[in-house]
Amino acid sequence: MSTNMGRAAEVLLVEDSPGDVRLTREALKEGKVRNNLSVVSDGVEAMEFLRREGKYADAPRPDIVLLDLNMPRKDGREVLAEMKSDENLKRIPVVILTTSEAEQDILRTYDLHANCYLTKPVDLEQFISIVKSVEDFWLTIVQLPSY
Amino acid sequence: MSAEAVPPWDRAHQLERLRVVEASLPADPDELRTIVDTSDDLICVTEIDGRFRWVNRAFQRRLGYTPGSLVGVQSFSLIHPDDVGAVLEAARSPANAITVAFRFRHADGSWVHVEMNRRIAYDDVGNRTGTVIVSRDVTARRLAEDRFRLLSEHSPIGIYIAQDREIRYVNPRFEQLTGFSAEELIGSDPLQLVLPEDRQMVHDCAVAMLKGERQAEYEYRILNRAGEIRWIMESLVSIEYEGRRAALGNYIDVTERKAQDEELQRTIKELARSNEELGQFAYVASHDLQEPLRMVASFTQLLGRRYKGKLDEDADEFIRYAVQGVNRMQQLINDLLDYSRVGTRGNPMMPVDCDKVIARVLDSLTTRIDENDATVTIGPMPTIVADAMQLEQLFQNLIGNALKYRGEAAPAVSVTAAEERDGWHFQVKDNGIGIDPAYAERIFIIFQRLHGKEEYEGTGIGLAICKKIVDRHGGRIWVESSPGQGSTFHFILPNGGTNQS
């Protein structure tokens, strides 16, 4: 199955835990949407990637960003705030993917216009199904803005 | 009548004085009699041997005797036995005018305090003819003085009077509290006793209290004579003393109580701190443990998912055990997290309608109630002040347990509430397998289980959470049960109250 854009979906994962990167990769692999997964490990790199700066000059524009909240250098909250105040980036859907269940985190990220907030489940099956549902929802169901 | 020997020089002096006195008196004997009879003082004349020759009206009235009944009576028979010596001594004194205090017996047997001025009467040629005694009834004054003295001397409260910022009076207890004597204290500024850093506060409180702007006593430190710090609780009253404004101070030593208070406060603070720390520790530990555990669990599960049946039987078994262990650990950590959340992530206490709470619980248990063919009856429920989420969790766990530990018969669960002296008493009664009373206490301890994992699943956290919730609400929880007879879980939540907000 392909995306409703007729090409492989560009997914940017901002995640500092190699284990979670791998798990997300595996989960996307099991999904039905053809996708290219790019990974950066902190907020600074994420912004460079999104703005195609430095070594990311040729980076694709992501169709969706999966964003971890707790990262070194620049955390997910800052990335989210910068993206949502950037005319060029604010329309990219952002899914917060984190272990934090703290209510203040959830409220704050929605305040920052996160498109979706997901708590990483402790169970693999659940994780896979969550990644799949994100994929289904954002990459096949929702009509994303065309650029 | 035997004239007493009077020194000649004295007699001459007396004669001279009498003349002077007489010259200033009214000459008319009637006038004199009127003055004497209307006087409020007790006036009498006695013979040289001490018998009454004459008494005035005030004398009769004050002492309760009928007119004339005292004439010829020995005056000493009316004097208090303890005072006779002093009066005799005064009577024998060669000096003409003597003042002495003693007690006269009233006709009703009570004693009247008097202060006497004695004067010897002489005849025209200077021979002593008797004694003129003018006494004043000072009973009321003496009584007032006695009351004051007794109160002041035996008061457990230090008392002082200060005027113009100088101590005018201190009672014995005040001397004892400060270690300074009255002589040392009188004339000094009461603030001098106060520890310098407390002086401003004491001054402000004292001024406010004397103005009537402050009612509450205040506490401060003084340095006693031995150089020890003592805590004093003081109150001041504005009084009039010797015709001018003054402050009457009440001084109570609260050093011991203060020390106990401080010790108690320290202990409470320390307990609260260690409790808080423990709670945070459990929360952080279980929260942070989740992260690596999620990795172990996820990859073990991924391993199982991808390679089940592709390796040998041993590998499948190893993976199975690893997955089982990890799942169990996740469950334990989750439960530990739930448990620590009761203390660290509680919601504010607010009025909660128990009917609504239980309705939500039954809603979430619908499937299990149906599966078990159970009946759940709910009695009239009150509205109480509680953490709604935790109350829900409490009922959820107790009703859930009643369904879980069911007996042969279809589960019948009843939930009731009754108001009692110390709060609302709730009961969750079932007809399940029951509990050996020997374990009645243990079941509320975290991770304590009475059954094998194969029999009943769970980590043994449910009742520990119940207990923690009830504790947080300032109540208590217990069970009444015996094996095969069902169980009744009781808990009492204080009315509108909690020991922790």
Image: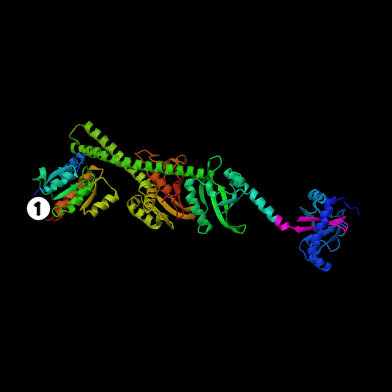
Residue B326, how many percent across, how many down?
A: 28, 38
Q: Is residue B381 left or right of residue B41?
A: left
**Of A73 and B367, the residue lying toward us:** A73
Residue B244, how many percent across, how many down?
A: 59, 58
Residue B413, how many percent across, how many down?
A: 41, 51
* Residue A29 appears anywhere in the view: no
Tell me the chief SS of the magenta region.
Answer: strand
Name the secondary structure under disc 1: loop
Residue at the extreme right? B1
Residue at left 55%, top 43%? B224
* Residue A125 appears anywhere in the view: yes
| Residue B131 included in the magenta stretch of the image | yes
Residue at left 83%, top 63%? B66
Q: Amino acid at mark 1?
A: Met
Residue at left 23%, top 31%? B314
Q: Is residue B106 left or right of residue B123?
A: left
**In the rendered view, would you say B320 is above or below A11?**
above
| Residue B106 included in the magenta stretch of the image | no
- The part of the chain drawn in magenta is B114-142
Q: According to the image, label 1 marks what residue?
A: A5
Q: Is residue B112 left or right of residue B244?
A: right
How packed mark 1 is, by other alpha carbons closer than 10 Å (few <14, some 14-19, many 20 or more), is: some
**Of B482 and B468, the residue lying toward us:** B468
**Of B201 and B395, the residue lying toward us:** B201
